[in-house]
Image (cartoon, rainbow, N blue to C red):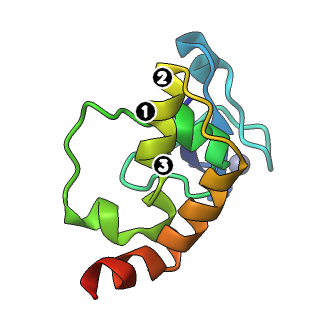
Amino acid sequence: MPIYEYRCKRCDGEFNTLIIRSGDELRIRCKMCGSTELTRLLSRFSYHQSEESRLAEFDTRKSRDDTFYKDSRNVGLWAKKRAKDLGVDLGPKFDEVVDRARTGKILEDYEK
Ligand SMILES: [Zn+2]
C-alpha cells in the first residue's frame, strides 16, 4: 500500500495519506483545512512506513542499485521477504542475524 504525500494549495499544509484503493485519492481532503485542492508530491517517498509495509511492498525480483544496500534498513529485508514468499520459518535467530547485518558486523566477519 503506497503512502502518498500531499501539499494543500489553499493552506500550504503537507500531510501524507495511505491509498488503499485507487478511488481513495479522489476523496482525500487536506487534514488542516479540508480543501480538496491538493498536489501530490511525487518525488518524496514516505520513510515513515513500518517494516511490515516495507516488507509487503518489497519486490525481490527487482534489481537494486547500490543506494538500496547502503540504506541499512534494507539489509535483511530481502532475505525476510524471500523467506516469507517461500513460507520458510526463519525462527527467532533470524532477527538476531538481521540486527548483526544492520550494524555491519556481518560484513566485518566476511572481510576478515
Ligand atoms: Zn489545507
Element at label 3: helix
Count of marks placed on residues: 3
Q: Which residue is mark 3?
A: 77
Q: Residue at x 62, y 59 (%)?
A: 12
**Is residue 111 rendered to the left or right of residue 31?**
left
**What crowding class fits label 1: few (fewer than 14 Cα within 10 Å), some (14-19), or many (20 or more)?**
some
Residue identifier under label 1: 82
In three-dimensional space, the C-alpha distance between marks 3 and 2, rounded to whole angstroms, equals 12 Å
Image quarter where the N terminus lies is top right
Q: Give amino acid for label 3.
A: Leu
Marks 2 and 1 in Cβ contact (< 8 Å) = yes
Where is residue 70 shown, x and y percent of the image?
Answer: 33, 71
Q: Position of residue 47 (x, y in %)?
A: 56, 58
- Sequence order check, earlier mark of 1 and 3: 3
Q: Nearer the viewer, residue 49 or 13?
A: 49
Q: Nearer the viewer, residue 17 or 80?
A: 80
| Residue kind at label 1, given as amino acid type | Arg
- Answer with left or right where residue 74 lies relative to residue 70: right
Q: Earlier in the sequence, mark 3 or mark 2?
A: 3
Q: Is residue 44 above or below residue 99?
A: above
Residue bearing mark 2: 85
**From the image, which quarter does the C terminus lie in?**
bottom left
- Residue at image coords 30%, 77%: 110
In the rendered image of this protein, does residue 6 appear above or below residue 105? above
On the image, the x and y values in percent for residue 58 come to: 43, 37
